[in-house]
Image (tube, rainbow, N blue to C red):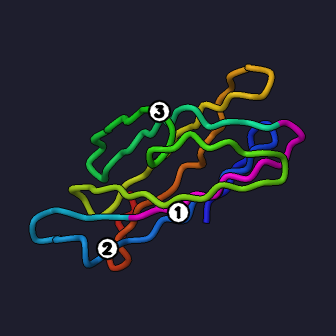
Amino acid sequence: MYKSVTRNIQVTVEPYYIAEESDPDDKHFFWAYSVEIVNLGEETVQLRRRYWKITDANGQVNEVSGAGVVGEQPIIRPGERYEYTSGCPLTTASGIMSGSYQMQSDSGEFFNVTVPAFSLDKPDARRVIN
């Protein structure tokens, strides 16, 4: 698992390879990732936007942004958590995702919360060390 904390908002990500959704012979690899967002602070926040930077093993970068996550803009009160699962296809057997969530506090302030960089690795992929 990968974890980061920004302004008392803790983000934990757990990626996993989905073999039944992948076709390595056709260069199609698929991962799911579960995210848990915990409000460790004293102020209610709402997740407004997401930003992802997805880099495959060839160095190709894809950036994705939009409103909320999985069609929602959750409100997370102090001590509460929000969890969701999403997915990411790649044309290579490994890659890295990183990103951020734009939050809005009860007072109307917008701020970014870091999503920790996490590896997308096919379990039996051959490792190359440069």
Q: Relative to 61, is 52 on the left or the right?
A: right
Considering only order in the chain, which callout, 1 or 2, is on the residue closer to the N terminus?
1
- In percent of width and height, residue 63 lies at 36, 35
Q: Nearer the viewer, residue 78 or 114?
A: 78
Q: Quadrant of residue 128?
A: bottom left
Q: Residue at x 85, y 36 (%)?
A: 43
Identify the image quadrant of the N terminus. bottom right
Q: Nearer the viewer's eye, disc 3 or disc 1? A: 3
Disc 1 marks which residue? 34
Disc 3 crowd rating (10 Å Cα; few below 14, some 14-19, many 20+) is some
Q: Is residue 38 magenta?
A: yes
Q: CA distance from mark 2 to mark 3?
A: 37 Å
- In percent of width and height, residue 99 lies at 52, 40
Q: Nearer the viewer's eye, disc 2 or disc 3? A: 3
Considering only order in the chain, which callout, 3 or 2, is on the residue closer to the N terminus?
3
Residue farthest to the right, as pictured:
42
Magenta span? 32-43
- In percent of width and height, residue 112 lies at 65, 30
Q: Which mark is residue 126?
A: 2
Disc 2 crowd rating (10 Å Cα; few below 14, some 14-19, many 20+) is few
Label 3, secondary structure: give it: strand
Circles 2 and 3: CB atoms closer than 8 Å: no
Considering only order in the chain, which callout, 1 or 3, is on the residue closer to the N terminus?
1
Q: Which mark is residue 67?
A: 3
